[in-house]
Image (spheres, helix red, strand yellow):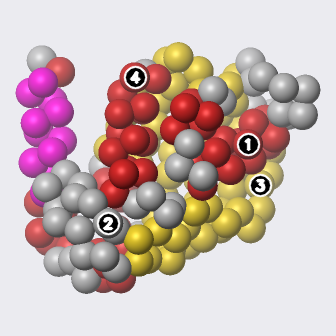
Amino acid sequence: MSEQHTTPADVVQAYAQAKSRADVQAALLYCSPDTVFETIAFQAVATGIDEVARQTAAFLRTFPDYGVELEYLVAAGDLVVGAGTIRATMVESLVGIEPTGRAFALPFACHWRVRDGLIAHERFFFDFHQMCEQLGLSTADAAARFAAWRERAKAVAR
């Protein structure tokens, strides 16, 4: 890791910038091998760098113009808390949901645990209903698709 990313907030900022460039490999450089990512709106948990890489790549294929606008980052020890706006346009399918070509702009909040200069845990919050509404999706149908996706993932893990 470069000298400029020495504080937990610096690590998170660099990670957010890489994701906003849709550069999965660069973003993963800021994550520990056993990292855990929770996307609360999707009720999704990815454990380990390989699963995080797969989910992140799928998300960024669906929303290639994904961008994070951080309003603030606050660090307390290894905990970094941030909020801002996420923006993206749905151009590919996600968990079987057909793309609408529409965009969303949503407020988000997130917290990260950074240990030994790497993100060990990310918990990401945004409003699922508002995302669906802005994308022109039925919230109920999208929630059912995510539930089915989670069930398939559990079956594969067994």
The residue positioned 10% from the left and 48% from the top of the image is 148
* First in sequence: mark 3 vs mark 1: 1
Q: Is residue 146 magenta?
A: yes
Q: From the viewer's perspective, is residue 15 above or below residue 6?
A: below
* Residue 39, magenta (yes or no): no
The single residue placed furthest to the right in the displayed view is 3
Q: Amino acid at mark 1?
A: Ala
Which disc, if any, is residue 91? 2
Q: Earlier in the sequence, mark 2 or mark 3?
A: 3
Mark sitting on residue 137 = none
Q: Quadrant of residue 129?
A: bottom left
Q: Which residue is mark 4?
A: 50
Between label 2 and label 3, give the one nearer the viewer. Answer: 2
SS at circle 2? loop
Task: Please state the extent of the stretch shown in magenta in the rendering.
Answer: 145-156
CA separation in Å, label 1 and label 4? 20 Å
Q: Mark 1: give few (<14), some (14-19) or many (20+) Cα within 10 Å.
A: some
Q: Is residue 75 visible?
A: yes
Q: Which residue is mark 1?
A: 14
Residue at image location 15% in from the left, 51% down from the top: 147
The answer to whether residue 85 is above or below residue 94 is below
Quadrant showing the C terminus? top left
Query: How far across and how far down the image is residue 17, in percent?
Result: 68, 50
Q: Which residue is mark 3?
A: 73
Q: Estimate the x, y position of residue 42 in percent, counting from the top left.
A: 31, 54
**Residue 109: percent from the left, percent from the top?**
58, 60
Front label number (4 vs 2): 2
At horizontal 51% and vertical 25% (from top left) the residue drawn is 35
From the image, which quarter does the N terminus lie in?
Answer: top right
